[in-house]
Image (tube, rainbow, N blue to C red):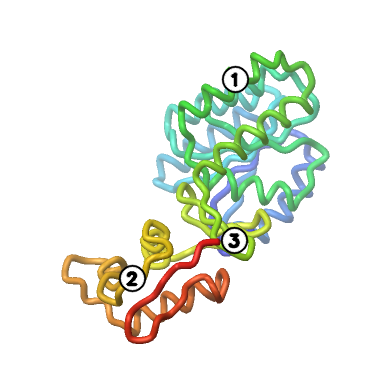
Amino acid sequence: MNNELLKELVVLYVEDQLDAQEELKHVFDRTFKKTIIANNGDEGLKKFITHKKRNYNIDIIVTDINMPKLNGIDMIKEVKKYDDNVKFVLTTAYTDPEYLLESIELGVTAYITKPINIMQLLEKIEYAYKQKIDKDMLQSLVNRMKQHNIKEIDEFFEVLDNETKDDDSAENIYLSDGFSYSFKNKVLIKDGKYISLVNQEIMLLEYFIKNSNKILSYDELLEAISINEHGNTSLNNLRTVIKSLRKKSSKELIKNLSGVGYKLILE
């Protein structure tokens, strides 16, 4: 879990049960940049609109489904009229799968059941924030839900997890020593945990992957990580980026051929 990423998030938490709300608020306050609390869907929508008008972006909305005044699904519909980029995590007890199917169609693919495991919730929040939703994938998921004629919530989560894993695997490439790289999320992955990369690390790693098992000259690699048209990146900078990639992954991932260049080794 990327704690540095979580520290930058502004989260709106919508929950009508005050005891559950108080417990999570204590954790959220220590984890996120800012936590905004709402007691029901109507209040959550109003707080979202108020912050939006002040140009204060909310990154993630964590919301219950069954709430008075405005339920979580209807709140999401209204929020998306103002901002289609905000991400959602639904917290839910055993409930009608039709609600969940509707939320899938709205682009929500991060859920956690009550009673809430706090570490799992934080992982879901990180996952939701990083995820780029593909409309075709969402429609495929909805079709599979209907095809399976899902009646129980456990079945829903099983199909959902399998679908998102399948979607992720198509975007990931195995490197070595248990590491893989996600082209979609631009992160390294090890044992299900995300390892964040800076811009030049991403540029260099993707260039290596596209030219795997080939010897790449210093000039080629310098050009690959140049951040402007003048290509003024230094050899020392290249070595620093490679050193950082090795530190975040495997020391054996990138081989140095002295006086020639570097080579990415894929197993």
Residue 137 is situated, as x and y percent measured from the top left of the image, at 51, 29
Task: Tell which residue pokes out farthest to the left in this image.
Answer: 230
Q: Which residue is mark 3?
A: 179
Q: Which residue is mark 2?
A: 216
Compared to 87, does 7 lie above or below? below
Identify residue type, mark 2.
Leu
Neighbour tally class for label 3: few under 14, some 14-19, many 20 plus, Cα within 10 Å: some
Left or right of 1 in this view: 221 = left
Q: Looking at the image, do the residues carrying marks 2 and 1 touch, with CB atoms under 8 Å apart?
A: no
Left or right of 215 in this view: 18 = right
Residue 126 is situated, as x and y percent measured from the top left of the image, at 60, 50
Q: Which residue is mark 1?
A: 102
Give residue 98's quadrant in the image.
top right
Residue 170 is situated, as x and y percent measured from the top left of the image, at 52, 41
Which of label 3 and label 1 is nearer to you? 3
User: Distance from label 3 to label 1 (Cα)?
Assistant: 35 Å
Secondary structure beneath dot 1 equals helix
Give residue 256's quadrant in the image.
bottom left
Left or right of 115 in this view: 222 = left
Front residue of 114 and 222: 222
Residue 79 is situated, as x and y percent measured from the top left of the image, at 50, 30
Give residue 65's quadrant in the image.
top right
Q: Looking at the image, do the residues carrying marks 2 and 3 touch, with CB atoms under 8 Å apart?
A: no
User: Distance from label 2 to label 1 (Cα)?
Assistant: 49 Å
Q: Which mark is drawn over residue 29?
A: none
